[in-house]
Image (cartoon, rainbow, N blue to C red):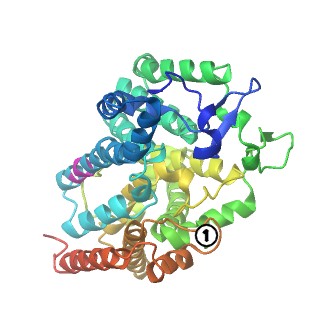
């Protein structure tokens, strides 16, 4: 964009990447969503001019771009993803404090939110997933405060950054937004969407996946498949791999999410039964309540001692429906594994929000054996994920494209490409153990 004032990447097709889409006229474009490039381009244009204007010729310009370009991507990740994500963590933490959530629960929530999901890895890379995560978090804040114009803007930019965010739309519509404000807020990202996809692929309704590099066409052709890349229905084998597979599954990467899913299913059934019982007592022809009523009743399943819910059940319903939508997409995608990815890469944008479901469980004052066991297991699994992603960030390699996630990571520790990897992991582990030990000394009612 800066060098040739064009979206086309044909000159770089062979030497830079295999992530491309080639249109029928032979032109090659990126197969990534363009949101991150649009957002960072003004900064990059200045950066590019400062580093290349004094070059004597075109070859020197290209050399300088290659030598310093990766530094810009690091700063873009830091300024546009890490800092906003950290500020959002502070905002959510403030909500927890306002709702009288105990300090130990605050610490466990922070561990899960900051370093307990695949998002912690992709916030350090600048190609869509990290920025979409930040935008979805801002979207949740806008929805919970009923700022529908901002909700439209952040949903639009999240979609412009990661196409899988489209599966969040049903969750957004469930919130009964004010459509005029929502549409007005989405005008800027919608305009960029229409411009980019029309220029590159001929229509605002055509995604780069339609012209995907053939090596990524890995879904068997059928009446329910789209472009040989994604199916309309989940593959049951992939569902199992996402939930408990050793390569990318929640069980091995972020087990607290899997445990929450199981808990949500059972508590949701309890909420459904509770809503039916309420209606049975007040009506001669009772019926089951809707998802929102069932979820609201399920909160009492935990008998939380906190009088004020941090976020209302309808907001948690948005999180849950968003998770289901993105999970459906990931399980229907031929390249579900996302290459070398620690956990389900294409679900990155919604995973930090799942940490909000921890709050009513960890704050529960129930003495029942099963709930005490659940709380203890969640805490252990959060600690595991915290250490695991610390390991991933330390070695600088997520995982091998095939094989066990843990096996490939441990190999990187014992046979590191960098001599500082074991040192970084040791320092991270010392800090992690100190944080967890400090948490044990804080009384719950403090």
**Residue at the spot 24% in from the left edge and 63% down from the top edge:** 106
* Residue 370 position by quadrant: bottom left
**Residue at the spot 63% in from the left edge and 59% down from the top edge:** 337
Left or right placement of residue 214 versus residue 209 in this view: right
Left or right placement of residue 366 versus residue 282 in this view: left
- Residue 40 x/y as whole percent: 38, 33
- Residue 315 x/y as whole percent: 40, 43
**Residue at the spot 79% in from the left edge and 42% down from the top edge:** 225
Left or right placement of residue 128 versus residue 361 in this view: right
* Residue 386 position by quadrant: bottom left
**Residue at the spot 31% in from the left edge and 45% down from the top edge:** 75
Element under label 1? loop
* Residue 19 position by quadrant: top right
Is 40 rendered above or below residue 123? Answer: above
Look at the image and say whether residue 410 sits in the magenta stretch. no
Q: Nearer the viewer, residue 414 or 178?
A: 414
Q: Nearer the viewer, residue 362 or 93?
A: 93
- Residue 359 x/y as whole percent: 33, 61
Residue extending farthest to the left is: 446
Q: Which residue is mark 1?
A: 247
Q: Residues within 10 Å of mark 1 (few under 14, many from 20)?
A: many
Magenta span: helix, strand or loop, mainly?
helix
Q: Can the viewer see residue 248 in this picture? A: yes
Left or right placement of residue 157 versus residue 109 in this view: right
Q: Which residues fall within the magenta stretch?
A: 89-93
């Amino acid at each position: 964009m800066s060098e040739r004032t064009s979206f086309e990447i044909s000159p770089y097709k062979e030497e830079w990447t295999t992530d491309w889409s080639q249109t029928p006229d032979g032109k090659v474009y990126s197969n990534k969503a363009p949101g991150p490039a649009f957002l960072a381009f003004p900064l990059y244009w200045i950066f590019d001019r400062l580093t290349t204007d004094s070059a004597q010729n075109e070859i020197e310009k290209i050399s300088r771009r290659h030598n310093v370009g990766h530094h810009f991507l690091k700063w873009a990740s830091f300024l546009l993803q890490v800092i906003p994500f950290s500020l959002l963590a502070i905002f959510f933490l403030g909500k927890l404090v306002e709702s009288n959530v105990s300090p130990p629960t605050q610490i466990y929530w922070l561990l899960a939110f900051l370093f307990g999901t695949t998002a912690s890895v992709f916030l350090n890379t600048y190609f869509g997933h990290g920025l979409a995560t930040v935008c979805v978090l801002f979207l949740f804040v806008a929805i919970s405060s009923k700022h529908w114009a901002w909700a439209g803007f952040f949903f639009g930019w999240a979609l412009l950054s990661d196409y899988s965010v489209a599966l969040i739309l049903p969750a957004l519509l469930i919130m009964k937004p004010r459509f005029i404000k929502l549409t007005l807020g989405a005008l800027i990202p919608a305009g960029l969407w229409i411009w980019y996809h029309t220029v590159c692929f001929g229509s605002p309704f055509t995604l780069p996946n339609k012209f995907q590099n053939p090596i990524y066409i890995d879904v068997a052709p059928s009446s329910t498949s789209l472009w040989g890349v994604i199916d309309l229905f989940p593959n049951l084998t992939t569902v199992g791999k996402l939930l408990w597979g050793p390569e990318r599954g929640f069980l091995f990467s972020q087990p607290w999410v899997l445990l929450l899913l199981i808990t949500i299913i059972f508590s949701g059934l309890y909420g459904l039964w509770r809503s039916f019982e309420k209606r049975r007592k007040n009506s001669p022809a009772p019926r089951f309540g809707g998802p929102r009523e069932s979820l609201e009743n399920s909160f009492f399943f935990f008998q939380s001692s906190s009088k004020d819910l941090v976020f209302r059940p309808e907001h948690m319903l948005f999180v849950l429906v968003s998770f289901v939508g993105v999970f459906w997409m990931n399980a229907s995608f031929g390249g579900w594994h996302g290459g070398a990815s620690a956990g389900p890469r294409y679900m990155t944008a919604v995973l930090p929000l799942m940490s909000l479901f921890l709050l009513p469980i960890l704050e529960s004052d129930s003495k029942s054996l099963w709930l005490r066991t659940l709380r203890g297991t969640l805490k252990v699994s959060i600690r595991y994920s915290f250490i695991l992603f610390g390991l991933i960030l330390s070695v600088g390699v997520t995982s091998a494209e095939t094989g066990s996630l843990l096996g490939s990571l441990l190999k990187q520790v014992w046979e590191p490409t960098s001599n500082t990897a074991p040192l970084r992991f040791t320092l991270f582990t010392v800090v992690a153990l100190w944080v967890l030990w400090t948490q044990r000394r804080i009384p719950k009612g403090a």
